[in-house]
Amino acid sequence: MAYSEKVMDHFSNPRNVGEIPDASGVGEVGNPKCGDIMRMYLKIENNIITDVKFKTFGCGAAIATSSMATEMIKGKSVDEALKVTNKAVMEALDGLPPVKVHCSVLAEQAIKAALADYYRKIGVDPEPIIGPIGDCEACSCSL
């Protein structure tokens, strides 16, 4: 399985790893069947994501997609972060092998789960804004 240089870089040198103790929103997504679990922490001030951290338990592609997703939303508005798709994450990493596409889906879902938590904390129903948040149902990882 061949990975792009960007995937290898984000796997070997992941950006924004860690936790934010007083996070504005925390989201966790994953599938215990494949073992990929992502937790994303957001610090939001004046509708801008001023800081973002992640903790991912999973394969190299899961770590790389988490790292890239955090880079893509840091400094962006909540609305801009909501528009980040798994396709955009994959393109930013110069692609992923087909069996690892689900990792980029998890990265998108982790952003949405953290934003949903943020909306709940400020008293806003996240469902109409974000929609349903799913997990890695079409998981094709080897067990």
Image (cartoon, rainbow, N blue to C red):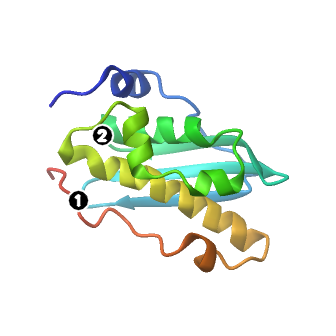
Q: Residue at x 57, y 35 (%)?
A: 71
- The label shown at residue 43 is none
135 to the left or right of 84? left
Q: Residue at x 18, y 55 (%)?
A: 140
* Residue 133, position as x, y percentages in the image: 47, 70
CA distance separating discs 2 and 1:
13 Å
The image shows residue 129, relative to residue 64, as above or below, that is below
The image shows residue 23, relative to residue 31, as above or below, that is above
109 to the left or right of 91? right
Q: In what quadrant of the picture does the N terminus appear?
A: top left
7 to the left or right of 97? right
For residue 27, say whether it is visible.
Answer: no
* Residue 111, position as x, y percentages in the image: 55, 54
Mark 2 vs 1, N-terminal side: 2
Mark 1, Cα crowd under 10 Å, few <14 / some 14-19 / many 20+, is some
113 to the left or right of 102? right
Q: Residue furthest right?
A: 46
- Residue 70, picture quadrant: top right
Task: Quickly name the residue at label 2.
Answer: 59
Task: Quickly name the residue at label 1.
Answer: 139
Identity of the amino acid at label 2?
Cys
- Residue 30, picture quadrant: bottom left
Mark 2, Cα crowd under 10 Å, few <14 / some 14-19 / many 20+, is some
Tag 1's secondary structure? loop
Q: Pointers 2 and 1 in contact (CB under 8 A)?
A: no
In this view, the mark in front (2 or 1) = 1
Instruction: Name the residue nearer the viewer: 115 or 90.
Output: 90
Identity of the amino acid at label 1?
Cys
* Residue 129, position as x, y percentages in the image: 62, 73
